[in-house]
Image (cartoon, grey):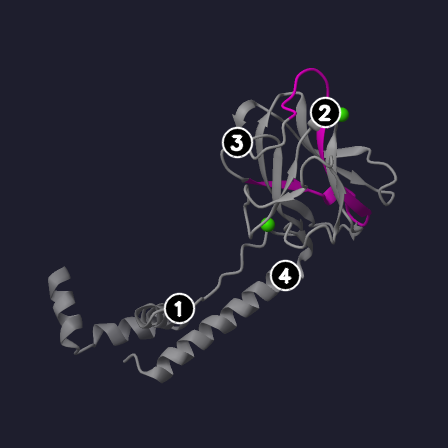
Amino acid sequence: MGSGNTLSIGILWFLASWQSFSGTLSGALLWSEDAENGTAFVIDGTDASYPLIQSNVVARGNHAFHLANPGFQDNWFTIDRTIQIQPDTKLFFLSRLRAATSNQVARVQVSTNGGGTWGTNIFGQPGTGFPGEGNYSLREVNLATFANQDLRFRFYFDFTSGSAYTESSDQEGWFVDGIQIGSSFEKIPYSIGNPSNQAQLYLEYINRARADAGAEATRLANSTNPDVLSAYSFLE
Ligand SMILES: [Ca+2]
Ligand SMILES: [Ca+2]
């Protein structure tokens, strides 16, 4: 038990399973934007006094988007891509609205004419004061009503009227990461990393049980390994 060959087979089985699993998911993903590629695929509509992409309040990877209302101005960014919506398409994003008054509204808007006009709000969340949300949350918007249309997406931090938090430090405004347009939210790809011998052995046991639970149960029930037998008698 635990020879190099069986361990390698277990690892290969695991990797093959993972690849087919992730392949299925990515087939349904039309676009993703994680703020990890600078502004290569976005249009930056923020004030010059702070960066759209920052690295202090992040949900995934090393960077996330940040929108504030300096000078009581609306700030925004657009995903620089036109996407044809399918009947099962949804918008997913990780969102954290920190200090903001109820006059500061985190919106997502869509355009059906290539960004010429932005008539439709598909998401809206007003602020709740200080300190606001303590963590990122996954938000989901069903886009079925736009099926077969070509959409563009804008994340728009809207100052409406009255008072506002106009600072743009890590404490204020709207933080966005992990934007995905697709049929399901794709989790962070699991990295097998550099597992210890013991971790590989456990993985082998798990894989055997998954591959044929009955055979594994029979093998364990018939084991003559003194350690296994002693564990059985302990549990009885
Ligand atoms: Ca990120
Ligand atoms: Ca406004």
Q: Which of marks 1 and 3 is nearer the N terminus?
A: 3
Residue 211 figure quarter: bottom left
Secondary structure at badge 4 equals helix
**Label 2 CB-ligand 2 distance < 8 A:** no
Disc 2 versus disc 1: nearer the observer: 2
Give, as a three-letter code, the residue at label 4: Ser
Instruction: Check disc 4: other Cα within 10 Å, few if <14, some if 14-19, many if 20+.
Output: some
Label ID, residue 210: 1
Label ID, residue 71: 2
Q: Which of marks 2 and 4 is nearer the N terminus?
A: 4
Q: Which of marks 3 and 4 is nearer the N terminus?
A: 4
Q: Earlier in the sequence, mark 2 or mark 1?
A: 2
Q: Where is residue 53 in the image (x, y as percent from the top left)?
A: 65, 45
Ligand 2 positioned in quadrant: top right
Count of marks, rendered view: 4
Residue 154 figure quarter: top right
Assess whether residue 78 is covered by the magenta stretch.
Answer: no
Label 4: which residue? 26
Give, as a three-letter code, the residue at label 2: Gly
Residue that protrudes farthest toward the top in the picture: 162
Span highlighted in magenta in the image: 137-166
Q: Quadrant of the N terminus?
A: bottom left
Label 3: which residue? 133
